[in-house]
Image (cartoon, rainbow, N blue to C red):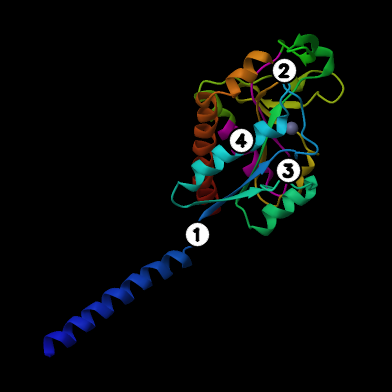
Amino acid sequence: MRRTIISIVVLWLALFAGDHALAQQEQRGMREFRVAIDIGHTPATPGAMSASGEMEYSFNRRMAAVIADDLRRHPGIAVTLINEAGREISLLQRGDVANQAKADLFLSIHHDSVHERYKVTRRVDGRNSRQSDRFRGYSVFFSDKNAEPAASLEFAKQLGRAMREQGMTPTAHHAEKIPNEGRDFVVPEYGVYRFPDLLVLKRARMPAVLLECGVIVHPDEEQELNTPERQRQIMMAVRSAVLNLSTWLRETRR
Ligand SMILES: [Zn+2]
């Protein structure tokens, strides 16, 4: 009888201690790091058309899903996938979804085109295709009018560097001095551009970045973006940049 009572007391202490440790962890603010992944464009307004005639939205949707699945498997990271249902939503509403989810980071996934003056028309499968061999590579955009400009730039640099380390190269074509381009190329070696008035980034109240994964009007780069190897390189780059940013935020906010 005495033994039983002692075991119950020991068991109760063990359970209490376990709960206590969890409560302490919560008090220390060690909650999950939530990443909002935004699928650029919608089925009705699908963005750029690739060299082979595929719409940008389907590239964005596929890449966002690969990134989200990977991050969700990582302990301590949670994911909000924005507009998975493919509804018509505005750029501002995308930011609102991330704000409501109290995301720690916002990443918008896109695939790139080039200015019309750099495109040529070729016959592909019996139709005219507008394509370009001139530019290929990734770009990373941040807005210094976002609520977290320093952390946004930090994540843009981490992501651009990780993309490079995965073997991809940035493109400089958004810095061309022509209409709708001429962006401020702040870290050329990592493909980082400053784009102050990019609405989708301005609305988010957390660090926010837009990734152009590659140029889909470039026929060779489009094919590469369709391979699992390239998708894996992008996925690994995002994972590494997300982990680095969560550490950087913890250290700078301590
Ligand atoms: Zn786009």
Q: Give x and y (percent) for residue 190.
A: 60, 25
In the image, residue 238 sits, relative to residue 2, either above or below, namely above
Q: Give x and y (percent) for residue 51.
A: 72, 17
Q: Nearer the viewer, residue 8 or 31?
A: 8
Disc assigned to residue 51: 2
Q: Which residues are magenta?
A: 135-159
In the image, residue 239 sits, relative to residue 33, either above or below, namely above
Camera-near label (2 vs 3) is 2
Q: Is residue 194 visible?
A: no
Whichever of callouts 3 and 4 sits on the residue coming sooner in the sequence is: 4
Q: Label 2, secondary structure: give it.
A: loop
- Please name the residue that numbered disc 1 is placed on: 31
- Amino acid type indicated by mark 2: Ala
- Amino acid type indicated by mark 3: Leu
Q: CA distance from mark 2 to mark 3?
A: 28 Å
Residue occupying the point 77% across, 9% down: 123
Q: Is residue 117 visible?
A: yes
Camera-near label (3 vs 4) is 4
How packed is label 4: few (under 14 Cα within 10 Å), some, or many (20 or more)? some
- Please name the residue that numbered disc 3 is placed on: 201
Whichever of callouts 1 and 2 sits on the residue coming sooner in the sequence is: 1
Whichever of callouts 4 and 1 sits on the residue coming sooner in the sequence is: 1
Q: CA distance from mark 3 to mark 4?
A: 21 Å
Q: Is mark 3 within 8 Å of ligand 1?
A: no
